[in-house]
Amino acid sequence: MSMNTAATLAPALRIGANRDEIAAALGEPQDIGVGLRGVTILAYRERTIQCTFRRGEGLFLLAFYFHPEKGTEWPLCLAALGDFSSDTTPGEVEDWLDQREITSLRMSVCDEVVIEASDGVRFHFESELLSSIQMISLAPSSGSTPHVNPRGLL
């Protein structure tokens, strides 16, 4: 039985969570911003954690950033992130996913490696070293038209 990547890495920070749920798990953010189209962005732990909310729809993007110049101490609710660092290679991420029976796809985006787990969690690499892990909602926002692939593929 395969595990869910998002639930393994961030069990208390589900996509769709509201700001109060995020604050209960991580505390108050160090920085709050407003992005395009009115999204709210919360930054934590010297901006190594980013939570992005659509107005009225809850958390739709959760990102963790790895910086080579410093080690990151993750909050207890994100303990599984301790398996990774800015020295983690694509092969090590694939091994981590394989051990948990999570299927993944390695691709190249702008000459950099991206590994996407079967539940949509993406591991981004710069110069073959882990730079971020991103979880994003695959559901369309309210009032938007779902994208349909012309080939009928997901």
Image: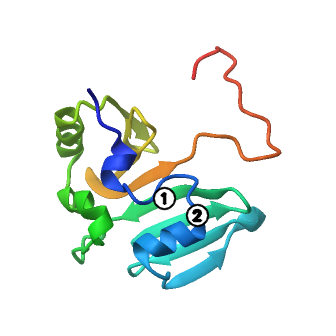
Eyeballing the image, is 116 above or below 86? above
In the rendered image, residue 147, in percent from the top left (x then y), is placed at: 71, 31
In the rendered image, residue 117, in percent from the top left (x then y), is placed at: 37, 36
Q: In the shown orientation, is residue 81 left or right of residue 25?
A: left
Q: Which residue lies furthest to the bottom in this view?
A: 30
Q: Are dots 1 and 2 in contact, CB under 8 Å?
A: yes
In the rendered image, residue 109, in percent from the top left (x then y), is placed at: 45, 41
Q: In the shown orientation, is residue 42 left or right of residue 85?
A: right
Q: What residue type is labelled 2?
A: Thr
- Residue under circle 1? 62
Please tell me which residue is depicted at 26% across the width and 26% down the height of the picture: 1
Tell me if mark 1 has few (under 14), some (14-19) or many (20+) residues whose alpha carbon lies within 10 angstroms of its own: many
Please tell me which residue is depicted at 30% across the width and 72% down the height of the picture: 75
Eyeballing the image, is 136 above or below 2? below
Tell me if mark 2 has few (under 14), some (14-19) or many (20+) residues whose alpha carbon lies within 10 angstroms of its own: many
- Residue under circle 2? 52
Please tell me which residue is depicted at 26% across the width and 73% down the height of the picture: 72
Q: In the shown orientation, is residue 7 left or right of residue 140?
A: left
